[in-house]
């Protein structure tokens, strides 16, 4: 029973933690490339630089990541939500998702993992699996990966503060077909000592 003034979130409890940035995870193995939309991705450690992603066990892209041990995380702007939605709802196991969605990739990365070139991401993280955890979660693998390289659009990112929030409109998934983006910049007051 939820406390007074609240409702029980039920099986969609994770929507309480949304909206979240949504990324395109891209991997390739034995000549087959595929990508998926994923919003359960986050920094894990600064030293060594690592990320963690909760990826659906049955997803074709996850299978390619397990086989190749390398992948890219591609950050797209909100203007690409139709592409992102397609990436999350079309299975690449039986169709060529790259062709269907008009995606283009490059393999000019340090790891050799493919990265998106169309649509053009505003940021890319190249990653190599450090550990794949199966026992912790039922329907997902927790993929702990070393960050091998990370780069962002020079007009939208600065190395001191990160994204230029007034310019970079990062796609964030709310629920279903609903997306949003960062809206405004709010700066906390300095703590007085």
Image (cartoon, grey):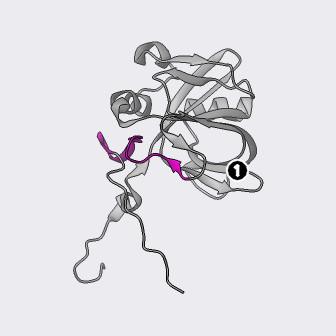
Q: Residues within 10 Å of mark 1 (few under 14, many from 20)?
A: some
Q: Is residue 133 visible?
A: no
Q: Residue furthest bottom?
A: 193
> Which residue corresponds to the image point at 39% horizontal and 45% vertical from the top-left?
172
Residue 18: x and y, percent? 38, 56
The residue closer to the viewer here, 42 or 152, is 152
For residue 28, side relative to residue 93 (left or right): right
In the rendered image, the vertical position of residue 84 relative to residue 178, given as above or below: above
Residue 186: x and y, percent? 37, 62
Residue 57 occupies quadrant: top right
Q: Is residue 118 visible?
A: yes
In the rendered image, the vertical position of residue 16 relative to residue 74, given as above or below: below
In the rendered image, the vertical position of residue 186 relative to residue 107, given as above or below: below
Q: Please give the range of residues in magenta.
A: 161-180
Q: How many marks?
A: 1
Residue 151: x and y, percent? 62, 36
The answer to whether residue 172 is magenta is: yes
* Helix, strand or loop at mark 1: strand
> Which residue corresponds to the image point at 65% horizontal and 23% vertical from the top-left?
28
Residue wearing tag 1: 50
For residue 50, side relative to residue 152 (left or right): right
User: In the picture, which quadrant includes the N terminus?
Assistant: bottom left
Residue 89 occupies quadrant: top left
The residue closer to the viewer here, 150 or 163, is 163
Residue 142: x and y, percent? 64, 50
């Amino acid at each position: 029973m939820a406390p007074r003034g609240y409702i029980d979130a039920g099986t969609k409890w994770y929507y309480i933690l949304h909206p979240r940035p949504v990324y395109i995870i891209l991997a390739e193995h034995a000549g087959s490339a595929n990508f998926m939309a994923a919003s359960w991705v986050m920094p894990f450690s600064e030293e060594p630089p690592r990320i963690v992603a909760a990826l659906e066990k049955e997803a074709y892209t996850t299978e390619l990541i397990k086989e190749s041990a390398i992948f890219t995380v591609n950050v797209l702007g909100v203007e690409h939500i139709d592409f992102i939605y397609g990436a999350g709802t079309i299975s690449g196991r039986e169709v060529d998702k790259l062709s269907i969605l008009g995606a283009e990739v490059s393999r000019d990365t340090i790891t050799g993992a493919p990265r998106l070139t169309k649509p053009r991401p505003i940021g890319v993280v190249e990653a190599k699996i450090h550990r794949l955890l199966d026992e912790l979660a039922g329907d997902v693998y927790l993929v702990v990966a070393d960050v091998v390289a990370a780069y962002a659009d020079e007009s939208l990112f600065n190395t001191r503060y990160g994204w230029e929030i007034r310019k970079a409109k990062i796609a964030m998934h709310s629920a279903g077909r609903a997306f949003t983006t960062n809206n405004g910049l709010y700066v906390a007051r300095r703590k007085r000592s």
